[in-house]
Image: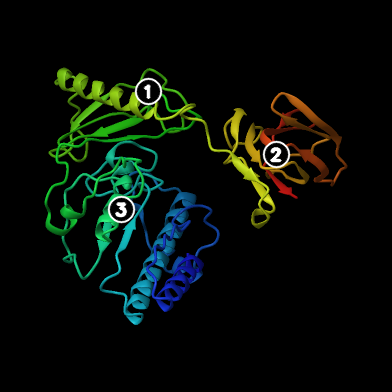
Amino acid sequence: TDIYFENAMTFMAQQKAKNKPFLSVITTNAPHGPYHDVPEALYQTYRQIDFTPYSVQPLGDKLHDNVRRIAAMITNIDDNMGSLFAFLKEQGLYDNTIVIFLTDNGPNSLRYVGPYRGMKSHVHSGGIHTPLLFHWPDKIKTGVKRSQLAAHYDITPTLLAACAIDKQGDLPFDGVNVLPAILDGDPVAPERTLYIQTHRGDRPESEHHFAMIGPQYKLLRPSGFGRESNPGNVPLELYDHRADPGESHDLAASQPELLQSMLTDYQTWFTDVSTTRPDNYAPPRIAVGRQDENPVVLTRQDWRHFQGRPWAGGSNGKWLLTLEKSLRISMQFHLAKNETHPKTIRIMNGDTLMRTVDMGDNDSWIKDVILPRGDVDLWFELVQEDATIGPYQVHLHF
């Protein structure tokens, strides 16, 4: 976090020296796991605090320690935000620089989320209702709260409007400019509905783990972020989110006509976003061949898995690559903890076996592998005594 902020401020100072505007996006990895590397002094402070009153679920020793480490990370972000504002004042940029602070989701365990219900990965509001803070002293009054329905895809049209920049090209925005609501409280698109759907898997599945939030009512199916498919036994839920922000009074049974009307609107939206381009949900391929990205690190986070749980031990998957030219690759293999060294590694491109290599006891490299120009579906079979699995990571050197 410190490094991200320090480098962002260096960039801003350079742009100011050139009399040029800037856009700086600081996406910290905090607060998030892994939890071993947090500011020690802050951690020691929070070790003395009992977080049980702020938790909905029981806090065992490990989870309690994680929450303390998360608190240390949050305070470190707060400190860096303070440094950022001090920097903007020193540079004479404070009054007319727009600073936006937002987060991606709710907390990673069931703990304090105000009046809401749920946590990260949930489609109840505790998982998806997050703060969006605008700081712009020249234009925005302090301490003002707006009730405008907004989402992440509203940020670009809003910033363009704030900076008086016309949109380039004909591609329409999904979002709207909410600057009038921020400045004056004037409602923008008051009848709009937001749609959110998030779950594991290569393709979205209709009516699976989604929420649609209208001006008054919210329809959702909490069928499980971790599931790639709808299990079929999780009912729809309907709430008056204005009167019932905690989503404690399900109206699905008492208002079936409203539920069906909203579900029809959802299905129209799902069809629309599923037909925007050919091969609509094809995942982006990983480009290999740029010298400023050498080596390329392939991780389980990025593969399209087909064996076991997506990132767990014993799993496997393929990496979808694209190459502008044929490359001679040296591959370094990494295993997860407690995974045994393979006797043999088979290198595959789709259904084609490229090479079979017998591995020495401590050997982790395979050299002189030719990857062809174009699209490559790369995967590996690491043959062990009692199992065949995929690697934890593969580093491609060229």
Q: How many other residues sit within 10 Å of disc 3, few (<14), some (14-19) or many (≥20)?
A: few
Q: Nearer the viewer, mark 1 or mark 3?
A: 1
Q: Is residue 385 visible?
A: no
Q: Nearer the viewer, mark 2 or mark 1?
A: 1
Whole-percent x and y of residue 239?
Answer: 19, 31
Nearer to me, 292 or 253: 292
Query: Which residue carries the number 2 mark?
Result: 391
SS assignment at label 3: helix
Residue positioned 64% across, 36% down in the render: 313
Mark with earlier residue (1, 3): 3
Query: Which residue carries the number 3 mark?
Result: 53
Residue type at the position of mark 3:
Pro
Whole-percent x and y of residue 15?
Answer: 43, 72
Instruction: Say the numbered circle drawn on residue 206.
Output: 1
Residue positioned 16% across, 59% down in the render: 183
Give the Cα separation between the discs numbered 1 and 3.
Answer: 38 Å
Q: From the viewer's perspective, is residue 111 above or below residue 16? A: above
